[in-house]
Image: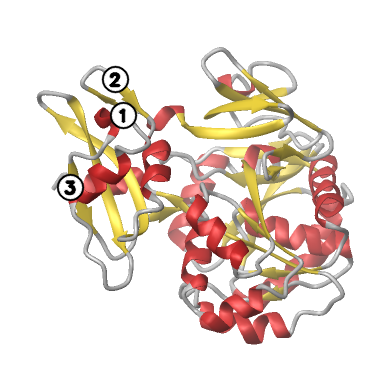
Amino acid sequence: MSVLRPLPVPTGAGVHALLPTLADALAGRGPAWLPVPASDARETARLAAALAPDTPIDDDVALVVATSGTTGVPKGAQLSASALRASGDATHRRIGGTGSWLLALPAQHIAGMQVLLRSVLSGTEPTVLDVSGGFDPHALPDTIAAMPGPRRYSSLVPTQLVKALDVPDAVAALAELDAILVGAAALPIPVLERARAAGLTIVRTYGMSETCGGCVYDGVPLDGVRVRIDGDSRVLLGGSVLASGYRGLPEHPAFAESGWFRTDDAGVFDDGVLRILGRLDEAISTGGLTVVPQVVEAALAGHPDVRECAIVGVPDDRLGQRVVAVVVPAADRTPTLESLREFAGRTVDRTACPRELFVVDALPLRGPGKIDRRALVTRISR
């Protein structure tokens, strides 16, 4: 039996030192590795306490990647070398072949780690945009210009794309890439349309640590990936990219059915195309009715006063929970609750329209780019 070892992941160009280790991992050589942030001792200690490095683990595990789940307690998805190779190879087949990659995400999370792994599979070294101090879209032109060809790719989260679209030179640079994978959170349709109108080749990805990252591209499963919808509209994922379970949690219900992972997402799968409706575990119960936050967010995404938006539920003595909109306003715009309710009411039931509005400078994030709804509820409930 192998042993799980911590893998300190640096920021910036220091990630290049990890490539030989990751090449061995993809080949099934060496110990299993637990990526941890080299510059964050507190987070490293939290992951170590939950995932027990330096203790035995099954021989077929190459990486244990911590999830960025909603409970605050990290789980470790056990990924085999064959699953990681299947994911990388299927990605390259879908987007047009191997190439060079731009790393603009923290590499200890699955999306950033996959940029490194795909680089290894491509026989290239990633070009790195250091995001340890935050994502600066003004750095994109010079960084992308340094990438070797002939094919060039990157992965971004929606908040990064939103910022980049406000910088013309960044947009021009991103338009030179052959594909930009955007995942970790839902990409609002107006942002997608704006990016594509500017000439960016956007590929919307859906997946999680438990599936080696994105495994459904623009709604279509990658080669070797299976999708199923259960009776409660829950999305189940299976196939060659699936994790073998969670570290130290052999009986976890998400992996109770052999060969399948039960997500917390609701979706529809028609004619081979998956459409995600929202997260089942984030639904708001208001006045006896259920509201899916992502549906309301999608309805508000096209409002001219809204740059970014999150919908959360807060305790309410009468309704159980009331629907609250937390909005980052568009430049020089001032959203009002009345205008948001009117706009949302064009496409969703009035019960789902927000009853309260908070305007903020930025939405708090967890993991590589998901909205931290628990932090928002804590902030606005004070």
Q: Looking at the picture, how far across and down is residue 149, in whole percent?
A: 84, 77
Return the residue at label 3. 338
Q: Looking at the picture, how far across and down is residue 357, in whole percent?
A: 19, 49
Mark 1 Cα within 10 Å, few/some/many (few <14, many 20+)? Answer: few
User: Would residue 171 appear left or right of 223 to someone viewing this image?
Assistant: left
Residue 245 in view of the camera: yes
Residue 105 in view of the camera: no
Give the alpha-carbon distance from disc 1 to disc 3, as whole Å. Answer: 15 Å
Q: Looking at the picture, how far across and down is residue 112, in whole percent?
A: 64, 59
Mark 2 Cα within 10 Å, few/some/many (few <14, many 20+)? Answer: few
Q: What amino acid is found at the position of numbered circle 3 in the picture? A: Glu
Residue 349 numbered tag: 1
Return the residue at label 2. 289
* Residue 349 position by quadrant: top left
Query: Is disc 1 placed on a helix, strand or loop?
Result: loop
Q: Looking at the picture, how far across and down is residue 253, in whole percent?
A: 57, 19
Residue lying at the far front of the rendered structure? 346
Q: Earlier in the sequence, mark 3 or mark 2?
A: 2
User: Would residue 260 appear left or right of 377 to someone viewing this image?
Assistant: right
Query: Is disc 3 placed on a helix, strand or loop?
Result: helix
Q: Quadrant of the N terminus?
A: top right
Nearest to viewer (mark 3 / mark 2): 3
Give the alpha-carbon distance from disc 2 to disc 1, as whole Å. Answer: 11 Å
Name which residue lies at 23% across and 58% down.
Answer: 335
Q: What amino acid is found at the position of numbered circle 2 in the picture? A: Leu
| CB atoms of marks 1 and 3 within 8 Å | no
Vertical relation: 103 (above or below) 139? above
